[in-house]
Amino acid sequence: MTLLSPTERRLLRDATPAERVALVVGAPRSGTSLVFELLVTRGRFAYFSNAAHRFWKTPAAATRLFRGAIRNWRGDLTSSYGHIPGWGAPSEAGWVWGRWTPEETTLTARDAARVDLETMRRTVGAVSEALGAPFVSKNVMHGVHLELLREAFSEMALIHVRRDVADNARSLLRARESEGDAARWISVRPEGWENARSQAPAAQCAEQVRLIDAQIERDATRWSIPRIEIEYDAVCERPRDVIDGAIEWLCEQGLSIERRGEIPERLERRAGRRLPPADEAVLEKALRRVREGSPA
């Protein structure tokens, strides 16, 4: 990164700050990584790659350096908790975005004064110029930072991925267990998450999904941000139709997207494996309260 710093400074100086971007948002474990990978496989997009993530202080220079690997990248639709393998693969780029939006909780326009929005916009612009394509990013934290991101990018378009709440919650709980503590909250903390901390872990996961989806929908409406919803089940059943529809919608929002590659006509749907009986009982009770319009 030290060696790439002079190139990074030059690229940011010469870049046109980005205004129009596409963001893939949704709850953790909802299928956002799958949709992200399908999008950049089907259409030609610029994005933060694993190389940019690794060289997080110099992502524009890293994109220029690894441009061949990024342009030639072809995925196999496999990921491990959001990580897609390969230097040129699309990345959530938490280290890059963490320079500007490190918090797991909501950031608003009031936080703009302490965030370097100009560098954010120039970095995205430089990456887009290096790859000659419109920029798309997937990061589950984007969903609680929409008001702030709107301050940077005046023409955002959101692809909101949603999954059956029960399956989503089961997958979230297993992700917690894989990190060694099912009771520890992981990933994004939407508005109101504190009220769920006293709940059992399965109920917390259901509430996390409900809250993040509600916040994305509310903030997109409040700030007039164009949004399209994609259901995880539909992506698995008809990936080509759903992704082509999303790309066509993005083109209607002003992004010029070229066709890049083929994607399958059907994918295996990963249903959330049922939890142990005690956890399933807690989850069902939480979902029943959600359906009745009460917090979990």
Image (tube, grey):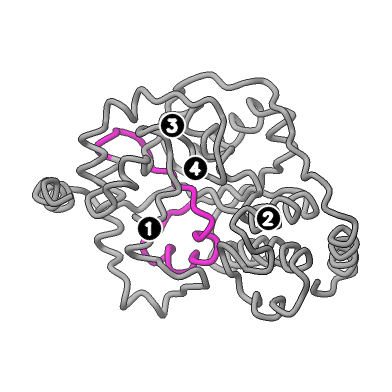
Give the residue pinned by disc 4: 83
Mark 2 and mark 1 in contact? Answer it, CB < 8 Å: no
Give the residue pinned by disc 2: 172
Q: Is residue 137 left or right of residue 188?
A: left
Mark 3 and mark 2 in contact? Answer it, CB < 8 Å: no
Secondary structure category for the residue under label 3? loop
Secondary structure category for the residue under label 4? loop
Q: In this view, does 289 lie to the left or right of 106?
A: right
Q: Residue 97 carries which label?
A: 1
Residue 124: x %, y % from top left: 31, 49
Amino acid type at circle 3 is Ile
Residue 149 magenta-highlighted: yes
Mark 3 and mark 1 in contact? Answer it, CB < 8 Å: no
Circle 1 crowding by C-alpha within 10 Å: few under 14, some 14–19, many from 20: some
Question: Could you give the CA–CA distance between mark 3 and mark 1, rounded to whole angstroms?
Answer: 24 Å
Q: Which tag, 3 or 1, sits closer to the chain's start?
A: 1
Q: Which mark is residue 257?
A: 3
Q: Of tags 1 and 4, which is closer to the observer?
A: 4
Magenta-colored span: 129-156
Q: Residue at x 72, y 76 (%)?
A: 196
Residue at the far front in the pictured view: 180
Q: In this view, does 14 lie to the left or right of 49?
A: left
Question: Could you give the CA–CA distance between mark 2 and mark 1, rounded to whole angstroms?
Answer: 22 Å
Residue 223: x %, y % from top left: 53, 66
